[in-house]
């Protein structure tokens, strides 16, 4: 008995105290995040179960991922749980120039948005729940083929932004729970493009901007369960101001032009939008759930992409590029069906869903970094409990986006067509 207790304490220490921070260091070093599957550079892959029902989850509590979707839902959780998942994204962008009809394709790496949730439900204080979530709700990785027509605008962009969120939830009545999370957002950015100066061999110069950033925010929510076939969720994730630290620009230009394009420090900032969500979950029967979310995303805060160089020259001035994003609505929903049930324990759950989101990018402001457009998508998923305390989740996402535009600043004019497929897999352990 003593050996068993000590072993459980070590497992608890590993899961609750050590593993999350090791996981943070790991994903900060390897994760690539593609922006094919969301509006702007918002990423909507934070839970496999939610992904199966169209990425909706504010009013349906199923596992520890409720810490992100609606922190108040943790108050209705029945067990403590650890949840980890990854959703590889296979995507491609095709660009057709309107003046030449030439076709260019991206060479993007496979995106790997990851998430980790640790939820603790004290047995002696059954109304209280707390936990930690590590997610990737924003990010982008896009890389274009060499010598493509827009190379002076962008050749590669890699943006990694993480939400680290400790959360507390309390069930104030049998029907109502409130939750709040404090969000720390570390991030990195690397932007590359060619410079319109030439070497003797005809190749162009190159610029690389890099830096790390950090910001802070919060995530609050309310969850109401009527005790019958209806539950409601309301959540708000605040906007976050990301300030770039240790920013740097490095130029590769002919030696005679090095004084005009000095490498050195720079400063910049990026505003991440707020997200307000209202969700509803209707249970016509014990086996069937119908879920629906409405998101209102405050993209209007992203109006300018600016870089302030520490050393200016007549050829290198501080830049301010208009983005003029607009606030948008997105609609998500789906069906969950309990296919196999054993001794009141779900063994196999099946899901189907989809959604539609408006683009925050207005006409005249489409760029290669986010060739975004209004989009519809479809999803599917399942959960399988293969051991008493263990279960697997799987999901699948597919979308196709087409957007034609002429950028007012760069005059890049053409049609972007994006196709993305994303199979996801997650594992859960509860106690």
Image (spheres, helix red, strand yellow):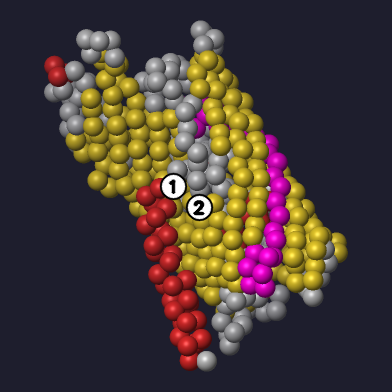
Badge count: 2
Residue 243 - label: none
* Label 2 neighbour load within 10 Å: few <14, some 14-19, many 20+: many
Residue at 32%, 22% (x, y): give it. Answer: 194
Q: Is residue 271 above or below residue 95?
A: below
Residue 254 percent across, percent down from the top left: 19, 18
Residue 31 - label: 1
Residue 323 percent across, percent down from the top left: 45, 32
Q: Secondary structure at mark 2?
A: strand
Front one among 236 and 5 = 5
192 to the left or right of 5? left
Residue 193 percent across, percent down from the top left: 34, 26
Look at the image and say whether residue 379 sits in the magenta stretch.
yes
* Label 1 neighbour load within 10 Å: few <14, some 14-19, many 20+: some
> Residue 76: which quarter of the image?
bottom right
Q: Is residue 396 above or below residue 163?
A: above
Q: Residue furthest bottom?
A: 1
Tell me how far mark 2 sits from mark 1, CA to CA: 8 Å
Residue at 24%, 38% (x, y): give it. Answer: 248
251 to the left or right of 138? left
* Quarter of the image with the C terminus in it: bottom right
185 to the left or right of 311? right
Look at the image and say whether residue 170 sits in the magenta stretch.
no
348 to the left or right of 78? right
Span of residues in magenta: 362-391
The reply to whether discs 2 and 1 touch (Cβ–Cβ < 8 Å) is yes
Q: Does residue 36 appear anywhere in the picture?
A: yes
Residue 269 percent across, percent down from the top left: 35, 43
Q: Which residue is mark 2?
A: 114
Q: Is residue 240 above or below residue 406?
A: below
Residue at 48%, 91% (x, y): give it. Answer: 2
Q: Earlier in the sequence, mark 2 or mark 1?
A: 1
């Amino acid at each position: 008995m003593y050996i068993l207790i000590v072993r459980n304490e070590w497992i608890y220490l590993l899961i609750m105290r050590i593993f999350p921070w090791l996981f943070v260091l790991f994903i900060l070093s390897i994760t690539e995040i593609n922006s094919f599957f969301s509006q702007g550079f918002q990423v909507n892959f934070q839970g496999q179960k939610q992904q199966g029902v169209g990425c909706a989850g504010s009013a349906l509590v199923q596992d520890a991922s409720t810490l992100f979707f609606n922190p108040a839902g943790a108050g209705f959780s029945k067990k403590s749980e650890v949840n980890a998942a990854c959703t590889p994204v296979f995507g491609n962008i095709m660009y057709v120039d309107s003046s030449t009809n030439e076709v260019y394709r991206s060479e993007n790496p496979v995106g790997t948005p990851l998430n980790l949730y640790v939820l603790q439900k004290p047995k002696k204080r059954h109304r209280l729940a707390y936990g930690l979530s590590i997610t990737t709700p924003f990010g982008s990785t896009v890389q274009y083929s060499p010598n493509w027509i827009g190379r002076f605008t962008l050749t590669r962009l890699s943006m990694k932004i993480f939400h680290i969120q400790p959360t507390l939830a309390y069930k104030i009545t049998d029907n109502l729970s409130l939750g709040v999370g404090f969000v720390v957002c570390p991030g990195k950015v690397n932007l590359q493009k060619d410079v319109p100066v030439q070497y003797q061999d005809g190749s162009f110069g190159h610029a690389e901007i890099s830096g790390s950033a950090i910001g802070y925010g919060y995530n609050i929510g309310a969850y109401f369960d009527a005790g019958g076939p209806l539950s409601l969720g309301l959540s708000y994730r605040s906007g976050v101001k990301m300030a770039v630290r240790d920013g740097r620009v490095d130029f590769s230009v002919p030696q005679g032009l090095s004084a005009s394009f000095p490498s050195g420090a720079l400063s910049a900032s990026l505003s991440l939008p707020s997200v307000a969500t209202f969700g509803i979950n209707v249970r016509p029967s014990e086996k069937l759930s119908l879920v629906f979310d409405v998101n209102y995303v405050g993209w209007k805060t992203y109006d300018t992409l600016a870089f302030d160089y520490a050393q200016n020259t007549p050829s290198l001035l501080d830049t301010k590029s208009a983005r003029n994003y607009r606030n948008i609505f997105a609609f998500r929903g789906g069906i969950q069906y309990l296919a196999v049930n054993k001794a009141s324990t779900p063994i196999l759950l099946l899901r189907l869903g989809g959604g539609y989101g408006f683009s925050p990018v207005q006409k005249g402001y489409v760029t290669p970094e986010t060739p975004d457009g209004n989009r519809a998508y479809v999803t599917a998923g399942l959960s399988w409990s293969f051991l008493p305390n263990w279960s697997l989740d799987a999901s699948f996402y597919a979308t196709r986006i087409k957007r034609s535009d002429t950028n007012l600043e760069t005059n890049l004019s053409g049609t972007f067509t994006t196709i993305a497929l994303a199979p996801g897999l997650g594992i859960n352990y509860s106690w």
